[in-house]
Image: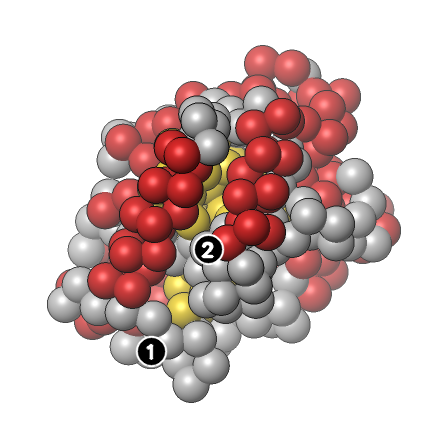
Amino acid sequence: MIDTHTHILAALDDGPQTWNQAIEMCYMAYEDGIRTIVATPHILPGIFVYPPQVILEKLAYLQTLLQEERLDITLLPGAELHADPDLLTKIQKQQVLSLNHTSYILLEFSFSRFPPRVEEYVGTFIHQGITPIIAHAERIKEVQAHPQKLSPLVRRGALVQVTSMSLTGGFGPAAQRCAALLLQHNLCHIIASDAHSLQRRPPLLTPGVDVAAQLIGETRARAMVTTIPQAVVRGERVKNLLPLPSILRQISSER
């Protein structure tokens, strides 16, 4: 499996604070069946600001430690980019990292609501050949209340990532219910761990994939942690299913 959203690098953001903790997280991921980890530290202006070279150096150091441990995990570079008005310019000037230097970015919005004119905002990236992957969409309050608001973003070409722990209830019933709806309505493409630690936010995908398999079938669920993220880290096109508009119109009345 490939985990495309992790906070695995030590003493960088709000992930592990020591390299021993980072190595232990990698062992846990390996035991779960994960063989490729994309390190995606937060990039949030004024709070988490890390030049690409800093991330790349820490990534190379952790990879060296894993080689010394004989742990067969491949680490790839990335970042969780908070949506801000200057983000496109930063990407074009290579001031922030995409996912493994491809045209895919992991894009984080506020946990409360989308910014005004979000369709236009997402469209500016698509127009420039950049594909946003919306991070942990099921935890955004506005999406929980109105999951259909993701539909126009997906139709424009954006992808959506949900967190494995959300599917198992680790982030509460609202996130769990929303994650299930996104899966069932073709509004989710990738399952990732969003790992931060060993206990509270572990690097595990299998529990979430097992839940997803019950909702949409084993083949589609497994693709969200294998073939789809593989295409992303290779910079290949992802053939995503279109949202189901007839069912999406019913969501608000059913909730």
The Cα atoms of the two marked residues, 2 and 1, are separated by 27 Å
On screen, residue 160 above or below 207? below
Amino acid type of the residue that numbered disc 2 sits on in the rendered structure: Leu
Is residue 250 in view?
no
Residue matched to label 2:
9
Instruction: Give the image location of residue 144, x and y in percent.
Output: 71, 57
* Above or below, comparing residue 172 to residue 189 in the picture: below
| Foreground disc of the pair 2, 1 | 2
Q: Is 11 left or right of 204, judged from the image as shown?
A: left
Of labels 2 and 1, earlier in sequence is: 2
Q: Is residue 147 above or below residue 207?
A: below
Task: For mark 1, give the secondary structure.
Answer: loop
Q: Position of residue 34 (x, y in %)?
A: 53, 28
Kind of residue sitting beneath label 1: Pro
Residue positioned 30% across, 47% down in the render: 60
Q: In this view, does 122 lie to the left or right of 220?
A: left
The residue carrying pointer 2 sits among few (fewer than 14), some (14 to 19) or many (20 or more) residues within 10 Å by Cα, namely: many
Q: Which residue is drawn at 42% across and 85% down?
A: 46
Along the viewing direction, whichever of 46 and 236 lies nearer the viewer: 46
Q: How crowded is mark 1: few (under 14 residues within 10 Å), some or many (20 or more)?
A: few
Is 5 displayed left or right of 113 in the figure? left
Q: In this view, does 16 lie above or below 87?
A: above
Residue lying farthest to the front in this orientation: 68
The image shows residue 225 at horizontal and vertical percentages of 52, 28
User: Would residue 225 appear left or right of 143 to someone viewing this image?
Assistant: left
Q: Name the residue under label 1.
A: 85
Please identify the quarter of the rendering in which residue 234 is found. Answer: top left
Residue 33, x across and y down, in percent: 58, 23
Q: Which residue lies furthest to the bottom in this view?
A: 46
Q: Is residue 23 visible to the viewer in this orientation of the structure?
A: yes
